[in-house]
Amino acid sequence: MSESQIILEAAPETFAEIVIGNSMRGPVMVNYWSAKAGPCIKLWPLLEKLVNDYSGRYLLVNFDTDKYLNFAQSELGITSVPTVKMYLQQQVVDTIHGAESEKSFRTMIDKYMPRASDPLVLDAVRQYQENNVEASLEQLKKLYQTDSDNPRIALTMMKLMLREGQFESLMSFHQKLSPALKKNEEIINLESHSQFLHAANQAVDRKQLEQTLSSQADNLEARYQLGALNLVEDDYTAAMDQLLEIIKQDLHYRNDIALKGMVTILNLVGSDTETARNYRNKMLNAMGR
C-alpha cells in the first residue's frame, strides 16, 4: 500500500468520511497539529515512520488546527497540540497529548492491532446473544487473565456487565485495569455511565433531592444523584446542568466524576450538535479555561 493511501489529510467537510467512516474498517490515528508548534514538527516524522513500519495496518490522518481552529475546538474538543487520537468503530479509543516517545506510540498502536484472542471475544459475544450470560462473562474473565492488554476484552466485558445491570461488578473490574486501559476513552465512558446508573438506582425520591438542594446547594452527592436521574430519563441538558454546578463547586469531586459524566453525555448527545457545542463551552468556562 502506497504512502498516499495510508497518510491522509482531513478537513471539517471530509472528517466524517475519512476518519469516522474508515474507523469502521480499522484503526485510524488522527494527528492534530499546528505549524506554529515546535513539538508538532518534531512529532510528524515519527508518526509517518510508524505508519509505514506497520505496513498500513492503520491510517494516519493529519488535521491542521491552524486552518480549522474553530472546528477542532468546538466540534472535536482539541485544546492543545500536538494531540493524537486513535479512532475505532466510530469512537475515540485512545489519546496521547504531546510529543511522546516512539515506545509510547507503539504501545498505543499495538493495543488495536488484531490479536489471537479476538475470535474468542466474538465467541463470548455469541454466547451472550444466545442467553448464556454467565458462560459468556466467565469466558471473558479467563481471556482477560491471559491477555489483559487487549482492550477489546475489557470493553466487551464492561459492555455486557452494563447491559446486565452489574454496576458494582463493573466498577470493581474497572479498578483492576491497567493505567493504560483506564485512559481508553470508551472505557472511561462505560465506567462513567455505570456510575450514573448506579447512582440513579440508589437515589431517593426526586422531590426529596430537589428539597435537599434548595437548602443545601453544596450537597454535591444529592446534585450528582439528581443528575443521574435526569440522565436515565433522557433529559440530557438537565443532567449536564447539575454536573456543571458540581464542576464549579469542586472540579475534582469523587475522582473527577462530574467531568467524566459531562464527557459521557456529550458523546451521547453527539459532538456535531448545537447542544454539545453549547455545553462543551459551558464546561470549559466552569473549569476556568
Image: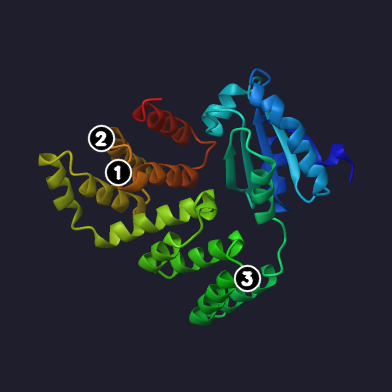
Q: Which mark is residue 253?
A: 1
At label 1, which amino acid type do we have? Tyr
Q: Secondary structure at mark 3?
A: helix
Residue 90 in the image: state x and y as whole percent. Answer: 62, 49
Residue under pointer 2: 249
Dot 3 and dot 2 residues touching (CB under 8 Å)? no
Sequence-wise, which precedes: disc 3 or disc 1?
3
Task: Give whichever of 64, 104 is nearer the camera.
Answer: 104
Rendered image coloring scheme: rainbow
Q: Is 5 on the left or on the right of 283, as rendered?
A: right
The residue sitting at 45% across, 68% down in the picture is 161
Q: Is residue 64 visible?
A: no
Q: Secondary structure at mark 2?
A: helix
Q: Secondary structure at mark 1?
A: helix
The quadrant of the picture occupied by the C terminus is top left
Residue 181 in the image: state x and y as whole percent. Answer: 53, 55
Q: Is 42 on the left or on the right of 5, as rendered?
A: left
At label 2, which amino acid type do we have? Gln
Residue 99 in the image: state x and y as whole percent. Answer: 63, 33
At label 3, which amino acid type do we have? Val
Dot 1 and dot 2 residues touching (CB under 8 Å)? yes
Q: What whole-number distance in Å separates the C-alpha atoms at marks 3 and 1?
A: 35 Å
Residue 45 sits in quarter: top right
Residue under pointer 3: 121
Sequence-wise, which precedes: disc 3 or disc 2?
3
Q: Is 282 on the left or on the right of 26, as rendered?
A: left
Q: Residues within 10 Å of mark 3 (few under 14, many from 20)?
A: many
Q: Which mark is residue 180?
A: none
Q: What whole-number distance in Å separates the C-alpha atoms at marks 1 and 2?
A: 9 Å
Q: Is residue 217 visible?
A: yes
Position of 101 relative to 188 (above/below): above
